[in-house]
Amino acid sequence: MRLFVALDLPSRVRTALADWADAAAPPVVRRVAPDNLHVTLAFLGSRDEDDALVVARLLSARARKLARLQTAGALWLPPRRPGVLTVALLADDGLSALQADLVAVLRSAIGFEPEARPFRPHITVGRVPRGTRIATRDALRAPAPALTFRAPAVTLFRSHTSAGGARYEPLARAVLP
Ligand code: ATP
Ligand code: MG
């Protein structure tokens, strides 16, 4: 099963980001459904059910209180030839510490191999179709909304990918204090 661990977002934040993407992104960009918006903390890739159970069990012990998070503007990734439109989050020590702690515990629990590049928290709001090139300068019709919020939980998701877009199934959820 294809697994990832993500930070959940309050519904008002998901709605605001989805509304902004609807209004501001070039029509060719495929919108991510509001219910699917999240901040990926660790993409585990293809794993067996035992790994999923291990991760599900360790999640709640890692939950820690985070300060309020803030959006930090639109961000095309990768910048030169974007595959996704995202909204960045302002760097936050507590969030980075939570992500680093999760990575460390996943590494020892299921042999997770983390990405070498630094964690840059973001929310993917749209996907650029394969073969389409976006001229990012002037591509957006409005600036991304500035939002401040508390993240409610960290969730282990199973991703069911298909041509119509991925469906995410929550397998375990740790509410943040
Ligand atoms: P699709 O791949 O069908 O367009 P999706 O990207 O939403 O849909 P997944 O590929 O299962 O679904 O990804 C789940 C989450 O993990 C998303 O936030 C995605 O950006 C992230 N992700 C996927 N692949 C990687 C990867 N190789 N490294 C880091 N994060 C990844
Ligand atoms: Mg993907």
Image (cartoon, rainbow, N blue to C red):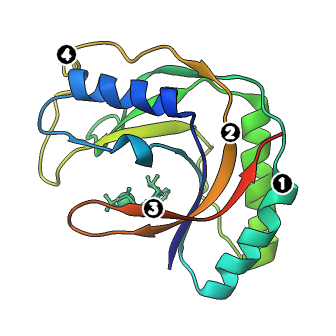
Front residue (pair 176, 73): 176
Q: Secondary structure at mark 2?
A: loop
CA distance for labels 1 and 3: 21 Å
Q: Is 49 positioned to the left or the right of 167 in the image?
A: right
Q: Which residue is mark 4?
A: 138
Above or below, comparing residue 168 to residue 136 in the picture: below
CA distance for labels 4 and 3: 32 Å
Front residue (pair 78, 109): 109
Q: Residue furthest right?
A: 61
Closest to the camera, between mark 2 and mark 4, is 2
Front residue (pair 121, 115): 121
Q: Which residue is mark 3?
A: 168
Q: Which residue is mark 2?
A: 152
Q: Amino acid at mark 2?
A: Pro
CA distance for labels 1 and 4: 41 Å
Q: Determine contact: label 1, label 3, CB under 8 Å.
A: no
Q: Determine the residue positioned at 51% across, 34% down.
A: 11
Position of residue 139 measured from the top left corner of the image (x, y, whole percent): 19, 22
CA distance for labels 2 and 3: 17 Å
Q: Residues within 10 Å of mark 2 (few under 14, many from 20)?
A: some
Q: Determine contact: label 1, label 2, CB under 8 Å.
A: no
Q: Which residue is mark 1?
A: 62
Q: Determine the residue positioned at 59% across, 44% down.
A: 8
Q: Secondary structure at mark 1?
A: helix
The picture quadrant where one finds residue 173 is bottom right
